[in-house]
Image: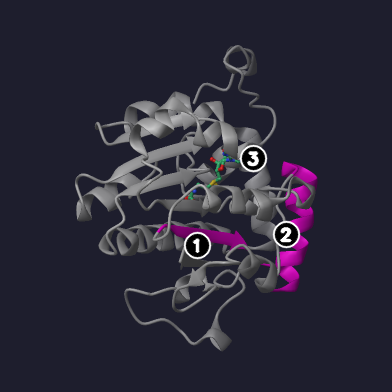
Amino acid sequence: MNERPEEWASRGIDITKPSIARAYDVVLHGKDNFEADRAFVAEIARLIPEIYDVAAYNRQILGRGVRFLAEQGIRQFLDLGSGLPTVENTHQVAQRVAPDANVVYVDNDPIVLAHGRALLAENDHTTVVTADLRDPRSVLNDPDVTRLIDFDRPVAVLLVGILHHLHDDEDPQGIVKTYMDAVPSGSHLFVTHFCASSQEARDAEKQYLALLGTGRFRTVEEITAYFDGLDLLEPGVVPLPLWRPDGPVPPESELTVGQKLMYGGIARKP
Ligand code: SAM
């Protein structure tokens, strides 16, 4: 992309610092990123060379999870911290199972709107909203959200690869609870999260916080606590490749640092 900072600044985009959405685009081998994003990822890759695979595991579980939810009959998806469009986006997976499934993407990075709207909002059942998920009330009352999501019917709330970008003092668990309180019985919560599962992960956390400003690698217990009050579905909160895999996977004891770097799970609201 054109790397002249002043042109992007007029659109509210600072390309001199890495952004979460653009750094994630780098690890997914996308092209919506700048030198600062690539430099940040290069630093992380020095600690965790598998970081590109980790992003792939996250996209793969996103696909398996959304397909699973659509097969359970879920027809409404609120994808919070949705990221730049890539392959197998939530609406493509959900609408393959159920063409009438409604999907609302929410992200606070203006580049997601700039690059995402045309690609993501490709049918009447899908839209992109620019909002901060840390303000659940404004997300839940946004007219584009309420146009496509009926809060009297079950909703899948997706917080995939995003809650680790919330600091402890922002009360991520309370934010999750506010969303889940707003949806009826039969709704689901889908979370994936960086996990403090190795020394490499703890070292990476320091680099994330120093260079990107966010990135809390929480314990399995802390990640599991997001699902408090919900019925955690099998196999629970596990390393991403182990969540309802499509093919054979190694036993947990043989997983690599990268395969254990993120944990995830899905729960149903009773
Ligand atoms: N959910 C996608 C996935 O897992 O493939 C994308 C994950 S990406 C690592 C996290 C996204 O969350 C980025 O696009 C970032 O801009 C967005 N994000 C970060 N903080 C946010 C906030 N407070 N409100 C809304 N979106 C946010």
Q: Is residue 5 left or right of residue 190?
A: right
Classify 10 Å Cα crowding around label 2: few (below 14), some (14-19), many (20 and above): many
Q: Label 3: which residue?
A: 134
Residues at discs 1 and 3 in contact (Cβ within 8 Å): no
In the rendered image, residue 186, in percent from the top left (x then y), is placed at: 39, 61
Q: Is residue 83 left or right of residue 93?
A: right
| Residue 63, visible in the rendered structure | yes
Q: In the rendered structure, which amino acid carries the disc numbered 2?
A: Ala
Q: Is residue 252 left or right of residue 14?
A: left
Q: Is residue 68 above or below residue 36?
A: below
Ligand 1 resides in the quarter of the picture at top right
Identified at 50% across, 62% down, the residue is 53
Q: Is residue 101 above or below residue 244?
A: above
CB of residue at label 1: within 8 Å of ligand 1?
A: no
In the rendered image, residue 38, in percent from the top left (x then y), is placed at: 61, 41
Please tell me which of labels 3 and 2 falls first in the chain: 3
CA distance separating discs 3 and 2? 24 Å
SS for callout 3: loop
* Residue span colored magenta: 187-213
CB of residue at label 3: within 8 Å of ligand 1?
A: yes
SS for callout 1: helix
Please tell me which of labels 2 and 1 falls first in the chain: 1
Residues at discs 2 and 1 in contact (Cβ within 8 Å): no
CA distance separating discs 2 and 1? 15 Å
Q: Is residue 188 above or below residue 136?
A: below
